[in-house]
Image: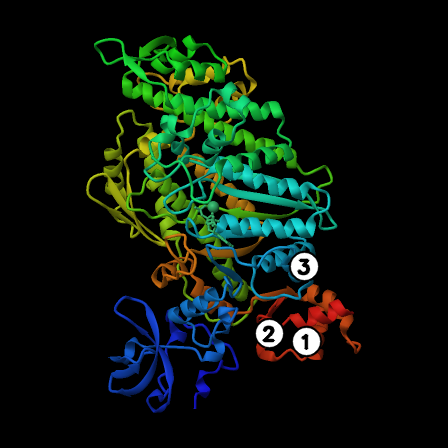
Amino acid sequence: DGDDLKEPSTPVRPIKQSYADSKWSDTTPYASKKKIQSWVQLPDGNWELGTILQTSGNDSVITLPEGKVLKVSSETLIPANPDILDGVDDLMQLSYLNEPSVLYNLQYRYDRDMIYTKAGPVLVAVNPFKKVSLYGNDYIEAYKRKSMESPHVYAITDTAMREMIRDEVNQSIIISGESGAGKTETAKIAMQYLAALGGGSGIEYEILKTNPILEAFGNAKTLRNDNSSRFGKLIEIHFSETGKISGAKVQTYCFGEQSRVVQCSEGERSYHIFYQLCAGASPSLREKLNLKNADEFKYLKQSNCFTISGVDDAEQFRVVLDALDIVHVRKEDQDSVFAMLAAVLWLGNVSFTSIDSENHVEPVIDEGLTTVATLIGCKVEELKLALSTRKMRVGRRNDTIVQKLTLAQAMDTRDALAKSIYSCLFDWLVEQINKSLAVGKRRTGRSISILDIYGFESFERNSFEQFCINYANERLQQHFNRHLFKLEQEEYIQDGIDWAKVDFEDNQDCLNLFEKKPLGLQSLLDEESTFPNGTDLSLANKLKQHLSSNPCFQGERGKAFTVCHYAGEVTYDTTGFLEKNRDLLHLDSIELLSSSTCPLPQAFASSMLIQSEKPVVGALHKSGGADSQKLSVTTKFKGQLFQLMQRLESTTPHFIRCIKPNNFQSPGSYNQGLILQQLRCCGVLEVVRISRSGFPTRMSHQKFARRYGFLLLEHVASQDPLSVSVAILHQFNILPEMYQVGYTKLFFRTGQIGVLEDTRNRT
Ligand code: ATP
Ligand code: MG
């Protein structure tokens, strides 16, 4: 009895049916068994473990732990795993692989503070929302010595490190998950491990200190996460031949979210650094920048949220100052940085007054305006002009005319200036950091990249920012799919290995919807952005007109449309799409900054002109649209993303999927529905199914023979790599079902090569 609950001796073969191994086999006479445990779904959607009492016809009678007896349709029951498999550290080990079993296994571990679980090659991390004692030097040492092997960020980072050295291939650690799932924390934990293993020169310390700086300037409190990263980050850590860290390079992916500087919703905050500066600046700095408390600045005041529980902004400011010192940002540059921050804050306090009967306005000359002028290093008169007029070049001869601004235009101009100062400041800081961490001349080209990028977002109201973020996630999902599924299959087929195909979600249709030219979301958005008369409504109509036949697209009433993403449907509101996509900056503002007597604003002005490739309003012909050669935000972002994907494709990827167990950022609460949705989004079950049916370890005949040939006890007549390989396999008694011999490579099931490696390391 109960024998068929054991793991079959050969792994389950993949079957096309989606939950094939979650069903009992037809021949299981489970009605006759005693105490068969099964998952029952309760009306609230949660799964509970019950015991089957009897089965007759299509119905089963089940008892639940609290003594309740239920009669349910046998069809709806899902087999549970035997107790002995409770809390296995790799989901591959489950006999029955189904959603409730996976949920239960993760919960079993989560309840015991074992937040990490393997899903085949993928590491699943469930956010504990509390301090867990899994980190620090003792743990690092244990993983380094391999005396500890339970799933961990350290373990996966260790693997990346070893593979980088062994295979001489660059590695990447790709961390994904929803907002608040723990990506940034996970990335820091991986960096700590690398610093401990590859440290010594001191540069690792500098690398770690980039975190508080980038978080201060790029993170903010949102409704989902008190420390939400509003930018994506790829940090490439370089190593010398001896495996020591030699430098690093940070690449950030920002867009749209500059708007947070001038506007954020109730209960959220702008970027941390503003509050830190207001709370932590020394008296002399306060005086120099004419700083006030955060609640006296309009940009910060509007969301009515100034503090984060458990966070001391003043203390954090000291941490940032310290970090800036460590990454060698000079004191005078630090002062300029703070002046720019104060200028942004004071810009928000600039107000306007009407000057004629045509609604034209001028800034009020008050403390706000004069302070901004002082901080930027320009004359009050120049600032006043830049905020109330716009120079336009018209006609063939490029004559300049000066147009007065209405209140709405003037406020837009003011906010645009604040946003671009902030985004230039952020880019400038990243540049300083990169200069300071620059890899020396003796670079080996070996690196491990860690990617921490915003996860899929779906809110009640989704705008341009979500549109970009979710597009990025489609691309990353494709990378994941490709790597784990497609490449896997292709490689088997190419090498002549018999391997049944496994179905997996392919998101190419959705990517086509975004990228296709000329009729895709991005092309149509760009086209509409260049039409002078384009509006958000005309954009929505155009999308509906051209894309309705795409299965991933659905038009909605008014200005909205829905995209069927791999992670679910998201309805986007096109309000503000065109404006945000154009991201215009007025020439007058650039001129203002370049007239500054301070180096930082000058640098910003030239980078705005040269690098940003933003369309510049003043340079437009009055009748025409944006210069078609300038790039829109979407196009620029797409280019960045392609570059990122290219970089990732030349690396061996390691995936970490972060899971948020509840929406309250609170420890101990495990919301099955929420977790299941995330597991489905990232295809955790499919990965496990594929991995345990496939041959994940592979090595070319040559490499195998070279690596283990010296372990052979007997002489092999033929010295060709294949013969040597086969002799090794025989000597080590690797069972025939545990490997396959391809045309060029050997393929192994999980865990098979361990004994060879161990022997090799001992020899
Ligand atoms: P976003 O996409 O919004 O940036 P994120 O995925 O980067 O979100 P984090 O900021 O890393 O999320 O994590 C959110 C919070 O969860 C952290 O501030 C911390 O309180 C908690 N947290 C995450 N991982 C851990 C961990 N390993 N141990 C303890 N707490 C954690
Ligand atoms: Mg983050």
Circle 3 residue: 141
Circle 2 residue: 739
Residue depicted at x 69% and y 50%: 198
Earlier-in-chain disc, 1 versus 3:
3
Write down the quadrant of residue 522 in the picture.
Answer: top left
Is ligand 1 closer than 8 angstroms to the Cβ of mark 1?
A: no
Instruction: Give the residue type at disc 3.
Output: Glu
Instruction: Give the residue type at disc 2.
Output: Tyr
Write down the quadrant of residue 257 in the picture.
Answer: top left
Image spot of residue 384 (x, y percent): 38, 12
Circle 1 residue: 729
Q: Nearer the viewer, residue 742 or 171?
A: 171
Q: Is residue 599 above or below residue 641?
A: above
Residue depicted at x 54% and y 13%: 597
- Residue 613 appears in the picture as rendered: no
Q: Is residue 498 above or below residue 227?
A: below
Q: Secondary structure at mark 1?
A: helix
Earlier-in-chain disc, 2 versus 1:
1
Mark 2 and mark 1: Cα distance apart in space: 9 Å
Image spot of residue 556 (x, y percent): 22, 45
Q: Secondary structure at mark 3?
A: helix
